[in-house]
């Protein structure tokens, strides 16, 4: 039997998307760690801090579904992906020239337009290029591990170090370099996928020979539940990531360096569990994993609120990051397994777009207002509530993991 080479195209595209998505979140989350520095120049309120994140999420919520639609329609996906990566890299560089809150806010809106389509494009390509037994692993590795290593581990350490040594403007100037490199690699290594509809997940195929449509995608039970669970996951995650750094420095009295270590610890857990949990769902099923690790998310904000010991805080925040797998499962894995493959891009795009609007746009603004009205701990309570809602709605999902679906079908036939 011929051994499978590691540098197969499947592995190549997974690694390439790992860096592409990682860089997206490095740029997106960098501003969270620079807020303590930017605040000195612009005297930001909690509401304005929420707006900087919410503005990007608003345009992301619009461009995500549009990007998913384009991904399903445009044949040259690698050119589409490379163009968006180069576009948001240029806008990220321009952040360094911002001289006011208004300028910074406009740039965040523009960045959301460029970043929104990247995940629907990459995840819809992975849905086609991934082998069935590795779909959860591949999507978890690219979405969660890439996100965590670059956005939650490297970003707080590198960005805070640059801002401390130079200034916050410098941190943005350097982002154009990896953007150009990634766009070049995508054009050179990626190939446009060929869809084989015969290999679709059985539960994604329509009955009675119906022709698939976007309307039918929207009526799909799992798509609706994916949108709901991902929206609440975003409420949990964004409220935690946006407001924890400021809370740790201003309320807990931690230094900027200590704060960066707490956030990096969450990022390390996010990277490890972000691939382990989706891989576990390949074997145990998507639904039970969503239920168990959705509830684990509550541990992160509650730890920041209640724990004063720095060492214990690091341990608990690391364990709480096991909820990270919920993000990729609800955002991309379950949607792509629930609809015909030709609609995987729009399924992911809609889930991201609506989730970003409620969890990424409205939530940071509401959390910021809550922080101004009831104190800096209010956003963290909102974060915990978001995780609880993920736990509750996950009970209503229909199982989509190929191994579990096949096992259930075999059991029914045997009976």
Image: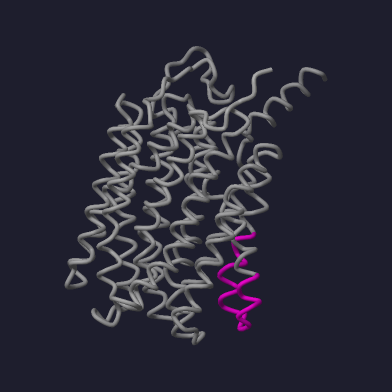
Is residue 406 found left or right of 204 in the rendered image?
A: right
Is residue 265 found left or right of 29 in the rendered image?
A: right
The residue at the point 35 percent across, 78 percent down is 164
1 is higher (above) or lower (below) than 305: above
The residue lying toward the viewer, choosing from 215 and 20, is 20
216 is higher (above) or lower (below) than 243: above
The residue at the point 35 percent across, 28 percent down is 72
> Which residue is the extreme one toward the top?
209
Query: Looking at the rendering, which quadrant does residue 56 occupy?
Result: bottom left
The residue at the point 64 percent across, 69 percent down is 316
Q: How many marks?
A: 0
Question: What secondary structure prevails in the magenta region?
Answer: helix
61 is higher (above) or lower (below) than 284: below
Is residue 162 found left or right of 113 in the rendered image?
A: right
Which range is magenta? 296-315
Location of residue 128 in the rendering, given as x and y in whole percent from the top left corner: 48, 27
């Amino acid at each position: 039997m011929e051994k499978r080479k590691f540098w197969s195209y499947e592995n190549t595209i997974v690694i390439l998307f790992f860096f592409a998505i990682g860089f997206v979140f490095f740029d997106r989350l960098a501003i969270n760690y620079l807020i303590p520095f930017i605040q000195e120049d612009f005297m930001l309120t909690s509401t304005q801090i929420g707006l900087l994140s919410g503005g990007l999420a608003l345009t992301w919520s619009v461009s995500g579904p549009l990007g998913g639609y384009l991904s399903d329609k445009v044949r040259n996906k690698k050119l589409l992906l490379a163009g968006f990566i180069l576009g948001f890299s240029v806008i990220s560089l321009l952040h360094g020239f911002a001289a006011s809150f208004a300028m910074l806010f406009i740039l965040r809106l523009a960045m959301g337009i460029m970043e929104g389509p990247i995940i629907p494009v990459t995840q819809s390509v992975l849905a086609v290029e991934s082998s069935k037994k590795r779909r959860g692993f591949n999507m978890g590795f690219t979405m969660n591990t890439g996100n965590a290593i670059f956005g939650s581990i490297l970003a707080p350490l590198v960005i805070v170090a640059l801002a401390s040594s130079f200034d916050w403007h410098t941190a943005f100037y350097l982002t154009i370099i990896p953007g150009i490199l990634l766009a070049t690699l995508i054009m050179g290594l990626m190939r446009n996928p060929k869809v084989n509809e015969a290999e679709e997940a059985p539960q994604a195929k329509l009955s009675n020979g119906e022709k698939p449509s976007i309307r039918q995608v929207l009526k799909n039970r799992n798509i609706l539940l994916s949108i709901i669970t991902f929206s609440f996951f975003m409420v949990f995650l964004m409220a935690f990531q946006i407001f924890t750094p400021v809370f740790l420095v201003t309320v807990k009295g931690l230094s900027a360096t200590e704060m960066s270590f707490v956030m990096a610890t969450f990022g390390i857990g996010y990277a490890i569990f972000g691939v382990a949990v989706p891989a576990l769902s390949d074997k145990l099923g998507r639904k039970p994993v969503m239920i168990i690790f959705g509830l684990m998310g509550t541990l992160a904000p509650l730890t920041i609120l209640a724990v004063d010991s720095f060492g214990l805080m690091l341990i608990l925040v690391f364990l709480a990051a096991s909820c990270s797998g919920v993000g990729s499962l609800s955002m991309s894995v379950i949607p792509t397994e629930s609809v015909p493959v030709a609609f995987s891009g729009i399924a992911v795009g809609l889930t991201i777009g609506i989730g970003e609007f409620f969890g990424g746009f409205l939530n940071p603004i509401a959390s910021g207002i809550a922080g101004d009205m009831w104190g800096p701990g209010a956003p963290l309570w909102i974060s915990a509530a978001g995780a609880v809602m993920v736990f509750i709605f996950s009970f209503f999902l229909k199982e989509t993991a190929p191994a579990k679906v096949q096992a259930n079908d075999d059991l029914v036939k045997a009976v």
